[in-house]
Image (tube, helix red, strand yellow):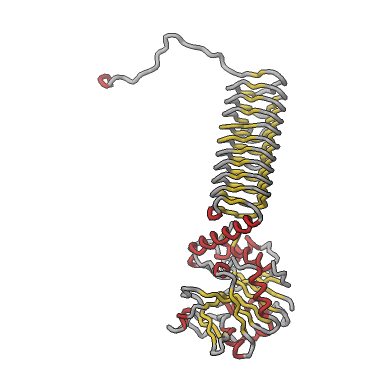
Amino acid sequence: MSLHIVVLAAGKGKRMNSALPKVLQPLGDRPLLKHVVESAQALDPARIHVVYGHGAEQVQSALGYLDVDWDFQAQQLGTGHAVMQAIDAVPDDARVLVLYGDVPLIRPGTLSHLVEAAGTDNLALLTVLLDDPAGYGRIKRGDDNRVVGIVEDKDASADERHIREVNTGLMCAQARHLRDWLSRLTNDNTQGEYYLTDCIAMAAADGVPVVAGQAGSVAETQGINDKRDLACAERMLQRRQADTLMAAGLTLRDPERFDLRGTLHAGRDTRIDIDAVIEGEVVLGDNVHIGPYCVLRNCTIGDHTQVLSHTVIEHAEIGARCQIGPFARLRPDTRLADRAKIGNFVETKKITLGQGSKVNHLSYVGDAEIGANVNVGAGVITCNYDGAHKHLTTIGDDAFIGSDVQLVAPVAVAAGATIGAGSTITKDAPAQQLTLSRARQVSLPGWQRPTKDSPEHE
């Protein structure tokens, strides 16, 4: 039987108190809905149908690239009504798995078991036991312990509210049955909505077996209703990702203080200290050490490189056995060859730094091509912007740039050249020579430092 997955994602999410639709709220730097669709895709379904409504333009703008069928729900009249928007596109002989765009931590393995439980003629329902079931629909069982229905929290009696087994909303059934049940739904309830859960009682009455399976963990079924729920889910997601990475060999100094907001590929014996943030796609080689409070965004870092604390690296390529930081910022298009060094309070942008070269402290180097074994002293600035255009600075192998030098681009420093400290270089510096640009030092005899007038003269 083919599998069609329907994701309900039309809700507004009032309790989020946000202009962003609920399903676009970020979890691990990806929208909630994208997490759900990724889990659905892992089951290799025939089609995924996303029922959307509130914030339609925003949802389409953010996630329109997803390989799904988009079904618009103009009025949000309940979960049953939402599934009605997609069911016409599903053939009778298919199975239908219903998911929710605000339940992002569900695992593909759990969904696969749910589909298997549905078999060829069952209705499979995912349930969970909660110590505090308030707000959730309760599972009603008959004398033989079989599921006979679900009662929503607002419609439950005092006795029914003591039931701890609750509905997660995730279910799987044959399309031919589901289409019939949906056509018979009414909105005769306190909310005036068409509840998908009413299909459970219909299935029991029609003699369709209702199979209730338990989720692997409560966290998998956690719905996101407000920013507190979102924060809890973030920590659950981060711990899940941390556990997966540690199982593969990554050392995390404290997995509770680790944030991955993208993808991370780490080699053997690589270590990440506390409160590091990984964004986009990051690749770390073997024996890489990332210090505390670092931010890595879309970068590649070679074997045995050390990144010291409070360093930001974005869209950069770092070679092997480099040392970076602390308090360094490597901006986009920074490329470091092996054994290069970037020290504290150094900012780079769109540069190549050759093998063994170093920019140790308090410098800005942008739009530059720097050779091998070059020393760039403290306080050096490449003056690359004239107010309208960026210009290139070129420094040859084995050059020495003294402290507090300004290199006014476009300018070239040839191989082996030395630039004296405090110089402003506006012309090309020749190879193997000392180039200086300083005013003559003078001392003025008899000069007196100004002093404030005494109080009686003020």
Q: Is residue 233 above or below residue 357?
A: below
Q: Is residue 312 above or below residue 265?
A: above
- Residue 53 appears anywhere in the view: no
Count of marks overlaid on the render? 0
**Residue 160 percent coordinates (x, y):** 47, 83
**Residue 366 percent coordinates (x, y):** 64, 35
Residue farthest to the left, as pictured: 456
- Residue 129 appears anywhere in the view: yes
Image point (66%, 85%), residue name: 177
Image point (61%, 65%), residue name: 33
Instruction: Please indicate whether residue 19 sits to the left or right of residue 247 in the image.
Output: left
Please state which of residues 55 and 231 is positioned toward the viewer in this rendering. Answer: 231
Please state which of residues 335 and 358 is positioned toward the viewer in this rendering. Answer: 358
Q: Is residue 294 above or below residue 200?
A: above
Q: Tell me the quarter of the image containing the C terminus.
A: top left
Q: Tell me the quarter of the image containing the N terminus.
A: bottom right
**Residue 231 percent coordinates (x, y):** 51, 60
Q: Quadrant of residue 388?
A: top right
